[in-house]
Amino acid sequence: MENSKKTIKYKDHIIKLTPHEDRCSLFAMTILNGEGKEVKHSNRAGKNENIAFENAKKMIDFDIEYEKQETEK
């Protein structure tokens, strides 16, 4: 497996994937907010890059929706 990090931007966040084998997962992920601060990390992001990025996007979408609901209270 290649030892380089893969990075994408998604909704003012940066998702970084790193090859990391842990049980059935082959990638770890780190999510940074728009200011570059780490907000989430998982050693078990997915068994391939596409799944790992999709899982990270779901976490970001969940957090955005949760924060939106909290501000409406």
Image (spheres, rainbow, N blue to C red):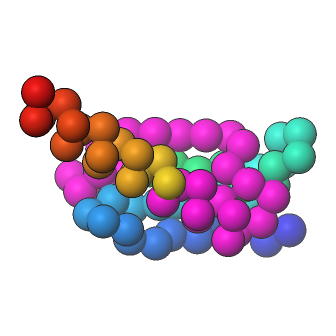
Question: Is the residue 7 above or below the residue 25 in the image?
Answer: below
> Which residue is rendered at x = 74% and y = 54% of the image?
46
Q: Residue furthest left?
A: 72
| Residue 37 magenta-highlighted | yes
Image quadrant for the N terminus?
Answer: bottom right
Query: As rendered, which of 38 and 54 lies closer to the eye?
Result: 54
> Which residue is rendered at x = 26% and y = 63% of the image?
12
Question: Which percent across, then down, holds residue 44?
Answer: 72, 43
> Is residue 15 left or right of 22 when viewed as pictured?
left
Question: Which percent across, then down, holds residue 43?
Answer: 68, 40
Question: Is the residue 6 above or below the residue 58 in the image?
Answer: below
Question: Which percent across, then down, holds residue 4?
Answer: 67, 69
Image quadrant for the C terminus?
Answer: top left
Which of the 4 image quadrants contains residue 34?
Answer: bottom left
> Which residue is rendered at x = 81% and y = 49% of the image?
25
Q: Residue furthest front?
A: 73
Query: As rendered, which of 59 and 48 lies closer to the eye?
Result: 59
Q: Which region of the structure is painted magenta? A: 32-57
> Which residue is rendered at x = 58% and y = 64% of the image?
53
- Is residue 58 visible from the viewing direction of this image? yes
Question: Is the residue 12 above or below the residue 33 in the image?
Answer: below
Q: Residue furthest top?
A: 73
Tally the marks: 0
- Is residue 3 visible from the viewing direction of this image? no
Question: Is the residue 46 above or below the residue 9 in the image?
Answer: above
Question: Which percent across, then down, holds residue 18?
Answer: 65, 57
| Residue 55 magenta-highlighted | yes
> Is residue 66 left or right of 47 when viewed as pictured?
left
